Amino acid sequence: MFPSRYWREIPQRYRLEAAKCTGCGKVSFPPRSKCPKCGGVEFDEARLPEKGVVKTFTIIRVAPSQFVEQAPYAVGIVELEGGVKITAQIVDCPLEDIKIGQKVRIEFRRLQEDGCSGVICYGYKCVPAL
Amino acid sequence: MRDVAVIGVGLSEWGELWKRSLREIFVDAASAAIADAGVDRIDSMYVGCMSGGLFVGQEHLASLLSDYLGVASIPACRVESACASGGVAFRQGYIEVASGMNDVVLVGGVEKMTDVGGDGATYALATAADQEYEVYHGVTFPGLYAMMANEHMSRFGTTREQLAHVAVKNHRHGAMNPKAQYPFEVTVEGVLKSVLVADPLRILDCSPITDGAAAAVLCPLDMAKKLSKKPIVRVVGSGHSTDSIALHDREDLTELAATKRAAEKAYKMAEVGPAEISFAEVHDCFTIAEICVIEALGLVERGKGGTAAESGLTALGGRIPVNTSGGLKSKGHPVGCTGIAQIVELTEQLRGESGKRQVKGAKRGLAQNMGGTGGSTTVHILEVE
């Protein structure tokens, strides 16, 4: 992971920065230069809501090298309040307890490490919400 | 636009080919297709390849391969659209012949996947997903399709056993295909006991890592009628559509909208509907993929794909045989080559050359080739004159 590639996504990964189209109100995450719904090019800054619902998920048993030590782990598609969907790990609960429709919220966590001397990568994960 | 025919097809050996290089297997397949076509020239060439760079450290493939094929001066172009690279290459060749720009066009596909280890292959394949917003979070390709499977099961009542039946059926077909990488049968019990990769998908739900190449020669229909002594196979429909590559950006996670749109275009062009298709080769990179694809193609109703393999509907002898070659699952899945290999199966079936797995009275075949989790799809319909 080149530092520049990692650094560019920090506003989204650390601060959940999104963009809300001033024309149609659609929220894009990550922000885009052109609204995928109406083609608009002007946006207001927005922050993703932190609460959502698990739409679907899986337990990764055979993991990429930088995630091997975490396996098995859960990854899901979570629909946040307002409708934006994200892919994120679901943590802090037994794997067998994860269900479609479960309420979760976003927390800031360490995600992966690029070897023993590379970038330590942070970002969002989801945890069960009451 | 001119009518276009497929006048020659060829496959290389498939499997884990430690002794063979990418350029060698491509030349094998292309030479076989040229010999089958009986042409003495190639005007132009398209090659589908997903990732020569990551799998064998080689780009600039079209020039390299035209050189090694002995046609170094022709215009040649490599086409990339992840696992749909082959299907898109076929469509580009079709458009070139239909337009009148050139007469004899070779379309090929190649992938040499076993020069890297499992982790290297996982990395290369994952580049077909969104690197920053999917792969970054630890999801793999089996993981993305597993999430589609879980949604399909929860929403439509599709069962774990029904997924297994797709693998059982395709291995039964593949066992009759001398070119298949894994030409043996599996049982539902065997699939359900195989190692979990990403719940609910197990290793026998997944297509393998394969080295392989495929090629087809296209020319105007009139020329084919003069040249060919074999039954003439005509391209009657072509559709191509794209979608977001991030699965989470789709309104509906299991609908495969790009496949649906590409199919609509191909059916319209061919002036037929799903009921008039005799057999289909579809992109079963995972068992759940075949279920979602046959729904998107309209071969079965939405949500009913799960019962198709179990009931025999999509087996040889059923109403609409799917993946008579063994599919990606049993025949193998050299990613950028797959779309052309599907055309090879369609052409051989339509000519009546498929031996034990021949679809009786095959008149019209459909090939659906998909990149990533459905971010790109081509659908082609071929008909025998």
Image: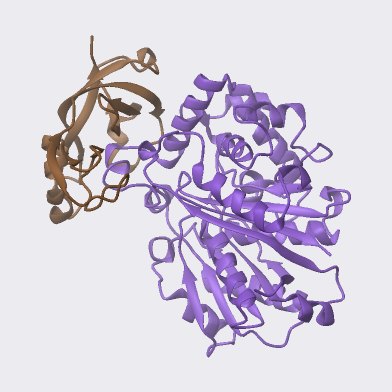
Chain colours: A brown, B purple
Residue B169 in percent (x, y) is at: 72, 36
At 77% from the left edge and 60% from the top edge, which residue is drawn?
Answer: B383
Position of residue B272 relative to residue A72, above or below, is below
Position of residue A66 relative to residue A75, above or below, is below
Q: Nearer the viewer, residue A24 or B72?
A: A24
Question: Could you say which quadrant of the image residue B308 lies in?
Answer: top right
At 12% from the left edge and 44% from the top edge, which residue is drawn?
Answer: A10
Does residue A121 appear anywhere in the picture?
Answer: no
Does residue B360 appear anywhere in the picture?
Answer: yes
Residue B133 in percent (x, y) is at: 28, 42
At 81% from the left edge and 36% from the top edge, which residue is drawn?
Answer: B318
Question: Could you say which quadrant of the image residue B34 lies in?
Answer: bottom right
Position of residue B188 relative to residue B250, above or below, is above
In the visual, does A14 lie left or right of A65?
left
Residue A101 in percent (x, y) is at: 37, 16
At 57% from the left edge and 78% from the top edge, which residue is drawn?
Answer: B45
In the visual, does B59 lie left or right of A87?
right
Split into 4 quadrants, where in the image is the C terminus of chain A? top left
